[in-house]
Amino acid sequence: MTPHLLLSAFGAAALVLAAVPAFANPEADRRAVADLDTAYQAAVARNDAEAMGRILHKEMILVTGNGRVATGEQLMEMARTQEIVYERQVEEPGTQTVRLWGRDTATVTALLWIKGVRKGQAIDRHLWFTDTYVRTPKGWRYAFGQVGMDVPAPAASKGK
């Protein structure tokens, strides 16, 4: 094989290998998504719109139990204006489940406890949510969320 042909063969092989995405470790993906979702909840609790923006997909939407839809930008604006001042915005321990759906999609389901003040009114709620993450060239991003209606605190942990 001539040096020119050998170089061409190596070049073609390199292009093929570069075009094939690296397969990630499922456990590493689960941990990364779990940690990212926990970080997102903490950013919301701090009203940290900048941190939320690093996690949210540019086309993210959230659908609430009563059918309202909020965009990621609207959620970040709520944080910037501190529409809610949080005492708690946390996933209840032991309720988070991360499921992978193929290579590039994951869901997080957990029971969320929200406690604070919204527009002068005290809130103290428990609700189940599902957050959907997609893998992008920049890493995992939170693309879609759906939250249920409030559940009574004692019965809340039975829904997992």
Image (spheres, helix red, strand yellow):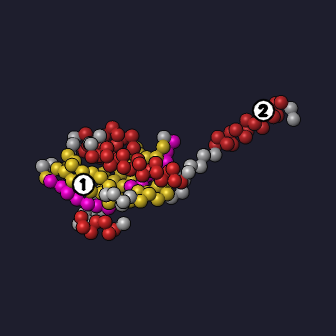
**In the rendering, at what x and y percent does residue 36 appear?**
41, 47
Viewer-nearest residue: 88 or 72 = 88
Task: Using the image, determine if residue 141 lies above or below residue 69.
Answer: above
Residue at left 24%, top 67%? 154
Any magenta on residue 53?
no
Residue position for label 1: 114
Q: Can residue 88 be seen in this view?
A: yes
**In the rendering, at what x and y percent does residue 12 appear?**
73, 39
Magenta-tinted stretch: 122-137
Q: Which amino acid does label 2 sit on?
A: Leu
Secondary structure under tag 2 reads helix
Residue position for label 2: 7
Nearest-to-viewer mark from 1 and 2:
1
- Specify which label sits upstream in the sequence, 1 or 2: 2
Q: What residue type is labelled 1?
A: Ile
Prevailing secondary structure class for the magenta stretch in the rendered image: strand
Query: Label 1, label 2: how many angstroms apart (C-alpha)?
Result: 61 Å
**In the rendering, at what x and y percent does residue 66 appear?**
26, 62
Secondary structure under tag 1 reads strand
In the picture as drawn, the residue positioned furthest to the front comes out as 93
